Structures are given as structure tokens and as C-alpha cells.
Amino acid sequence: MSIRNIFDVSGRAMSAQMIRLNTTASNLANANTIAGSKEEAFRPLRPVFATEYASKIQDNGIATVNVEQIVSLDRDPNQLYAPDHAKADKDGYVYQPNINPEEEMVEMMEASRQYQNNLQVVNTLRTLMARTMQMGK
Amino acid sequence: MNSIRDHLGIHANALTLREKRNDLLASNIANAATPNFKARDIDFAAELQKASASGPMQTSNARHFVSSAGVTRDTLYRDPVNPSLDGNTVELAVEQMQFSENTLRYHASLQFLNRKISGLMSAMRGE
């Protein structure tokens, strides 16, 4: 998809931030999901952002952001000793994902702030465009 | 036609340049979280002088690349105040300041153009 105007730039940046907010929400939602083995345990998700330039030939500096992929972080889950838990393995251990709520909250605040910034840019530029269309009246 | 263009003066060029700069600043804000993204900007005064001195650059062959603003611009890289670990040089406070200043100045140029156009209009009516 090509980048033609400011709505493409800011709109796609907003979708990227929205994906980031969604991964944070999934991480927080699964913070207390208990698994029966190390492999089954949930691992925190993070989106990978990449710049997409409007043009590779002309150097006009206009660029937006794309989510290249969503990776799960390679963090070993916490091992808890709970022999009476329904999912406990033969040694009596259960596995809790290694999710840090503070870290997720900071990520969430940053994403929502940057989402708002992009929205503000679109609002401001839209007003300016509307005024420009009234030029000479 | 030329005299009308002369009457509008520097503001016609300023308005297009301001718009291009808005696009650049919006790109910077969009990439505030992208690792290794380098914030870009133009030297407005120098670019305006370039645009006013020679006028829009023309192409003489169908296979020439058309420059996006009609003028070749030097898009520079911003020098960050606090460089971050991930190689991103976008600082939201700086970009927001530049953006709000740029939109205000765009508005000013637009206002000047409007006044000049209404001046021309009343001269034509001759009332």
C-alpha cells in the first residue's frame, strides 16, 4: 500500500499503536494464567515496528510505521510449587508466565500517548486543509 | 498571470513549504516508537530562499524524476538533545513544538494570502 498523504501516515501509525495496545492487553490478561509445563506457559508478546518510506527513489523524508511481526519474548516462566493445583506436574510444580505488570503499564501508557499524538496531528492538519479550501472566500 | 503571482509574493511559496514540513513532522511523530528511525526536517529559511530565487524546478524530459515539491529540497536529519538507546532520534516534545509552530505559521501565511486575494477582488469590483 502506498503512502499518499498525511492520513496514510498518521492512520497507519495509529493502527500500529493500537496493535501495541492489544498485545499489552493480552499480556496483562494472561499474567495469571497457570500452565502445567514450561513450554505451555504464556510468554509476553511484543510488536516489532518498522519504518515504511513513502518513496525509495525520491528522498522526501515522508514515512509511516508498520508492524513487521509480533514476537513472544523468550522469558522463562516462573516455577511455583503447588502440589494440590489441578495442573501441577508430577513433581508438584505449576508455571506462571513471567509478565511484569509495571512494565506492561508503562508500555500501555506510552502507546496510548503516541496514539493521541497521531490523532492530534490528523485533527490539526484536517482543520488547516479545510481552511485552505476556503481560501479567497 | 505573473503579476498576480507577484502580488501573492512570498506567501504562496511559504504555504507549500509549510505543508511539506508538516508532512515531515507528522512522519516523525508517527515513527516516535520505531527503533533506529532518524527524525528529519528541512531548513525552512534556506528552502524558502531557494524557492523564491529560482522558482519551481522544471523537468525537460518525460523520463526525468519529478521532485515532489517542485523544488529540490535538502531533507536534513535532526540532532537529538537526548539520544536514546534504540537509535531513535524522535523526541516528542521537540516534534510537538515544531509542529505547533509550523501549523501556526501555515495559518499566518494562509491569512496573508486570504487578505491579498480579497484585496484583489475588491480592486476588480471597483466599488
Image (cartoon, rainbow, N blue to C red):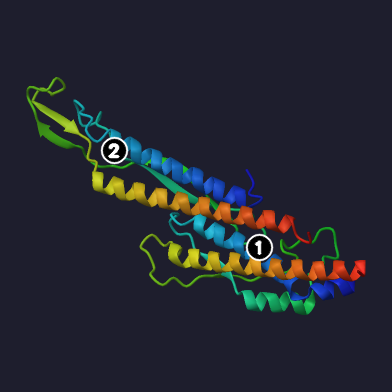
Question: CA gap, disc 2 to disc 1?
Answer: 41 Å
Q: Quadrant of residue A36?
A: top left
Label 2 is placed on what type of residue?
A: Leu
Name the residue that disc number 2 marks. Answer: A28
Inspect the image, locate mark 1, and give the three-letter code of the amino acid beneath it. Glu
Is A113 drawn above or below residue A44 in the view shown? below
How many marks can you see? 2
In what quadrant of the picture does the N terminus of chain B appear?
bottom right
Q: Secondary structure at mark 1?
A: helix
Which chain hosts label 1?
Answer: B
Q: Residue at x 31, y 42 (%)?
A: A73
Q: Quadrant of the C terminus of chain B?
A: bottom right
* Res. B91 in view: no
A40 lies left or right of A94 = right
The picture places residue B8, in percent across and down from the top left corner, at 79, 72
Mark identifier at residue B19: 1
- The vertical placement of A134 against B101, above or below, is above
Check the image and report above or below for B97 versus B45: above
User: In the shown orientation, is residue A32 left or right of residue A7?
Assistant: left
